[in-house]
Image (cartoon, rainbow, N blue to C red):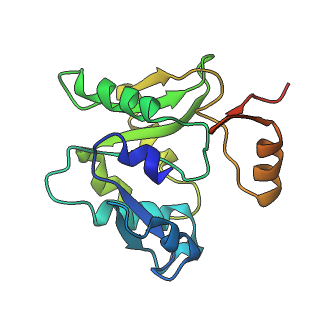
Amino acid sequence: MAMTAIATGAHVSVTLPDHDHPRAKALAGLPVQVISVPDADEGMSSSLRRGVGMLPRGMRAVVILPADMPELETSDILQVMTGFCSVPYPMLQQASTEDGTPGHPVLFPADCFSAMAQLTGDQGAREVLRSNKHRLRQVALPGERALLDLDTPEAWDAWRGECSDNGDEKICMPAE
C-alpha cells in the first residue's frame, strides 16, 4: 500500500506501533514519514490522532488509507483526491463500492484535524464522518475495492488463492 500511495506524488505518512515494528523494515528506503504510535493498543483512533498530529504544516487534507486493502490502486486514491480539489469548499471524500456502500480511502479536509485529534477507541473517524455528513461526497470505485479489508493471515491466504499469475502481475478476482 505504501508504494500505491507514493505513486500519487503526495506526502505519505505511515503509522506503526514503533520504529522496530516488522513493517518498518518493509518501508526502509521509501520516501515515507514513519510515525511511531506508542499507544497503538488503544485502538485505531490512536493511530489517527498521532498521524494527524504529525502531518507537515500547511496540509489541506489527509487521506486515510488502511494498509490491509490490497485491491486499492493509485488511481483510486487520485480519484478521491481529485474530488476534493474539484469543489470550491472543503468536502470530505469517501470511496464507496459501485452500489454506494462506504469504504476507503477517506479524505478529511484540514478543518477536521482538530476533531480527529480528539478521537478515542477503535471506531476510527466514524464520528467525524457522521458530524460532517452534510458535506460528505461519495466517490464510487470499481467493484468492491473500497471494502476489501484483509485483517488476518488466513484472509490474506484466501485472497491470494483467488489470484492467478499472469506473468509479472497477480490478477485477483472477487470471490463469487
- Placement of the C terminus among the 4 image quadrants: top right
Which image quadrant for residue 44? bottom right
**Could you tell me which residue is drawn at 71 percent across and 55 percent down?**
151
The correct choice, above or below, for 82 with respect to 58 in the image is above
Q: Left or right? Give the position of 45 relative to 81.
A: right
Residue 133: percent from left, percent from top: 42, 30
**Could you tell me which residue is drawn at 55 percent across and 27 percent down?**
96
Q: Left or right? Give the position of 88 relative to 169.
A: left
**Could you tell me which residue is drawn at 44 percent across and 35 percent down?**
74
Residue 100: percent from left, percent from top: 58, 20
Name the outermost residue toward the front.
Answer: 167
Total count of labels: 0
| Nearest to the observer: residue 170 or residue 101 | 170
Name the outermost residue toward the left.
Answer: 58
Q: Left or right? Give the position of 167 relative to 158.
A: left
Is residue 119 in view?
no
| Nearest to the observer: residue 114 or residue 161 | 161
**Could you tell me which residue is drawn at 58 percent across and 75 percent down?**
22
| Nearest to the observer: residue 168 or residue 59 | 168
The correct choice, above or below, for 18 with respect to 98 in the image is below
